[in-house]
Amino acid sequence: MSDCEEASDVVATTRNNIPEPEKENRPSPPAVIAGRSRSQGGGRRVTPTSFTVVSDGRSVVERVLPNGDFYVGCFSGNVPNGSGKYLWTDGCMYEGEWKRGKASGKGKFSWPSGATYEGEFKSGRMEGFGTFVGSDGDTYRGSWSSDRKHGFGQKRYANGDLYEGWWKRNVQDGQGRYVWKNGNEYVGEWRNGVISGKGELVWVNGNRFEGQWENGVPKGQGIVKI
């Protein structure tokens, strides 16, 4: 079996590459449900793990694989290691740092749709701090874990809405602030992508409601200020 054939076999096992981070449905003013994220599809790690390459004395190699994929960059121990670029036939591309055959460190991943992620990777996944720009213009800048928004981050929606706060497995969870483009604002707790817990809704005209929320609607008694 040739070197390129072996590389092609390995990449074929990782064909389901990093999926575009899921889009959250936006809450409608004055604030009800921020929307649950749909379940995430399977992902392809950026890990062509065993490009068996016979060294010819060069530290940088260039290979077109039998399946049409392309890699150019540094190798060490027969795997990508250092700086390199990998282009899949479906149009996805990763360019950045590699460690022992997996994307690790700083890099940029782009999808055929035009969406991009630029930031930190670990073991072939988006992990750490990074910025995702969706094909629809939404932008998220913050923490990631296993290809999902996780930790503190800020998301600017293409329609002008803004959320900044805590995320858990790709949805808002914890303390957060949501500002609609019309100026209405909610500050408080979220659970599983929905306004739930203690929080305050402030309308653009200055009216306020402070109290408990459940599944995006007020629950029990609260304080209304007009």
Image (tube, rainbow, N blue to C red):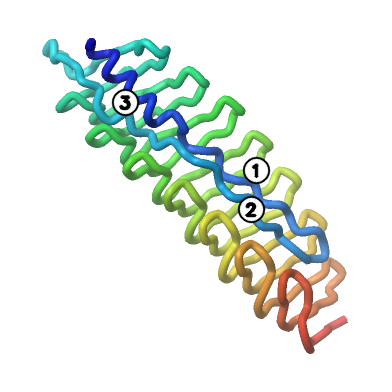
In the displayed structure image, the side of residue 105 where residue 52 appears, left or right: left
* Displayed quadrant of residue 195: bottom right
Asked if the residue under mark 2 is in contact with the one under mark 3, i.e. CB atoms within 8 Å, the reply is no
The answer for how far apart the CA atoms under marks 3 and 2 are is 32 Å
Asked if the residue under mark 1 is in contact with the one under mark 3, i.e. CB atoms within 8 Å, the reply is no
In the displayed structure image, the side of residue 18 where residue 171 appears, left or right: right
Instruction: Residue at 51% x, 57% y: name it.
Output: 169
Q: Secondary structure at mark 1?
A: loop
Asked if the residue under mark 2 is in contact with the one under mark 1, i.e. CB atoms within 8 Å, the reply is no
Relative to 134, residue 196 above or below: below
Say which label, 1 or 2, has the lower sequence index. Answer: 2
Percent position of residue 160, x then y: 74, 49
Say which label, 3 or 1, has the lower sequence index. Answer: 3
The residue pinned by badge 3 equals: 10
Say which label, 3 or 2, has the lower sequence index. Answer: 3
Type of amino acid at the residue the image marks with label 3: Val
In the displayed structure image, the side of residue 28 where residue 133 appears, left or right: left
Q: Which mark is residue 138?
A: 1
Relative to the observer, which residue lies in front, 58 or 3? 3
Check the picture and name the quadrant holding the N terminus: top left
The answer for how far apart the CA atoms under marks 1 and 2 are is 15 Å
The residue pinned by badge 2 equals: 37
Type of amino acid at the residue the image marks with label 2: Ser
Relative to the observer, which residue lies in front, 159 or 94? 94
Relative to 59, residue 46 above or below: below
Of the two numbered discs 3 and 2 in the rendering, the one whose residue sits closer to the viewer:
3
